[in-house]
Image: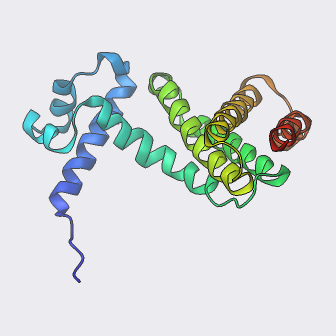
Amino acid sequence: MQDTKVDPRIIRTRRLLMDAFSKLTIKKDFKDITIKDITDEATVNRATFYSHFQDKYDLMDAGIITEDIIENIVENLSHYDQLNEESIINIFVTLTKFHTDLATQLDTKCRRSYASFSSIIEQKLKKELEKVFYSLLLKQQSKLDLEALKIGAAVLSWGIYGASVDWKHNSSLSAEQYIKIALPFIVTEINHFKG
């Protein structure tokens, strides 16, 4: 069976649109960016834009969030076999590394861009964490009600993500020190959940 190759022109045009969008996010808030702005910056027409993306949200999701940010962190989160202290510490450290790396990559010009996307990035990361925790809980607690497992996964994902944001903004501790202090509260809840 032959692999179907994507036309290099399609890849170049898609990258051109994503790069144009990235440049615009430095100059403008996301809400103020129009399709015309993007196509003008990329020097393509509207039809070309719509052959690649549904709208600017789709472009943002594909270019800025999914391809460049989320895939890197999800790759690091999806290889755990058990929900235990070690996996919780590693997940937390992965999130704090993400926050640190992102802050390092952004210079003052790009902060506006990050502010525009931060809630979407947060939402996507929480969703990915929820999938990881649900999978781990399902492996360990297969006899429990699926709805209870979904709720437990949501609570854990929001809690761990929230702790990583708190660490970033409010803590002078290392990520490892922070999570070791928080761990008894998380483990107590997990042990209670195991019931």
Check the image and report above or below for 22 versus 142: above
Of the 4 image quadrants, the one containing the C terminus is top right
Would residue 159 be found to the left or right of residue 19 on screen?
Answer: right
Q: Where is residue 71 in the image (x, y as percent from the top left)?
A: 49, 51
Q: Where is residue 85 in the image (x, y as percent from the top left)?
A: 85, 50
Would residue 144 be found to the left or right of residue 17 on screen?
Answer: right
Would residue 52 be found to the left or right of residue 179 on screen?
Answer: left
Check the image and report above or below for 5 versus 32: below
Identify the residue at image location x=72%, y=35%.
160
Identify the residue at image location x=36%, y=42%.
63
Q: In which quarter of the image is residue 157?
A: top right
Residue lying farthest to the bottom in this orientation: 1
Identify the residue at image location x=11%, y=41%.
48
**Nearest to the observer: residue 189 or residue 40:** 189
**Nearest to the observer: residue 55 or residue 80:** 80
Q: Position of residue 93 (x, y in %)?
A: 74, 46
Of the 4 image quadrants, the one containing the N terminus is bottom left
